[in-house]
Image (cartoon, rainbow, N blue to C red):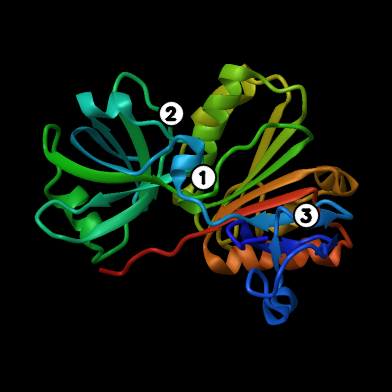
Amino acid sequence: ACGTCKCFAEAGTYDLGQEYIEDALTEEEAEQGYVLTCQMRAASDCVVRVPASSDVCKTRQVTYQAAISAVEHLSDSTIALKIKGESLSQLAFLPGQYVNLQVPGSEQTRAYSFSSLQKNGEVSFLIRNVPGGLMSRFLVGMAKAGDSMTLAGPLGSFYLRDIKRPLLLLAGGTGLAPFTAMLEKIAEQGSAHPLHLIYGVSNDFDLVEMDALADFAARIPNFTYSACVSSPDSGYPQKGFVTHHIEPGHLNEGDVDVYLCGPPPMVEAVSQFIREQGITPANFYFEKFAASAA
């Protein structure tokens, strides 16, 4: 064995195999969890991290020029941005992935997940309005239709896989964005399996795109959703954190694929909650995000 296929095994049990030299895989690397995929023999379901670019799934990163087609302030905390350009009609991405958007007038970029599929060269994003944030200042105070924007992508390994079992989708704040893109795809292709989304926010005014979720529920027969607000002062019927609203049936005794997108504390809380239930989901995909302060 030459070591070309060396990968990191994140989970699962396996036999490393014997037909390789130490130059290909050292004892120390094996102890750390590295494997040679041409040699390993899986004894259970395994999660293997493959060091490959987006080219593998035909979503190669490219820089595009486009223009703002719409800016909508959905609430005090959330902005919907749409950009459009002829070149974007060639943009191929998987629902759940993100791009780096350059802040006009600066060299800085911010990462945002697509909140829609690409349609006629137009894509959408849900952007948190961060007080003092560079992108937020631009969108709130200066942005208008026709303004040029540069984006590079797609990026990320958080994307919708083939649906082979029930799905539990967990969104925190603007972490809803990748799920609306996923739901658009599911609405197009259908699903034989049940899907449930739990959408958690901090305050009542953070709840956005509720009409869109209702529309998805009407278009996707097996899709249900709920929302919750963590503020004790909330007037919304369902209060608390996302973990307070995960029911045993949602986890389906482990025969479930969990997708989670939210701030780091939420990701850690959900991960701990699922462990405490004694459940190991068939697959657990997550994306952590944190707002840039400037």
How far, Cα to Cα, is label 1 from label 2? 14 Å
Between marks 3 and 2, how big is the CA–CA gap? Answer: 30 Å
Residue 203 or residue 112, whichever sits in front: 112
Which is more foreground, mark 3 or mark 2?
Answer: 3
- Disc 1 residue type (three-letter): Leu
- Nearer the N terminus, badge 1 or badge 3? 3
Residue 98 in the image: above or below residue 166? below
Mark 3 belongs to which amino acid? Cys
Q: Which dot, 1 or 3, sits closer to the camera?
A: 3
The quadrant of the picture occupied by the C terminus is bottom left
Q: Residues within 10 Å of mark 1 (few under 14, many from 20)?
A: many
| Horizontal relation, residue 16 to residue 128: left or right | right
Q: Position of residue 52 (x, y in %)?
A: 51, 51
**Snapshot quadrant of residue 49:** bottom right
Q: Return the residue at label 2.
A: 117
| Residue underneath mark 1 | 176
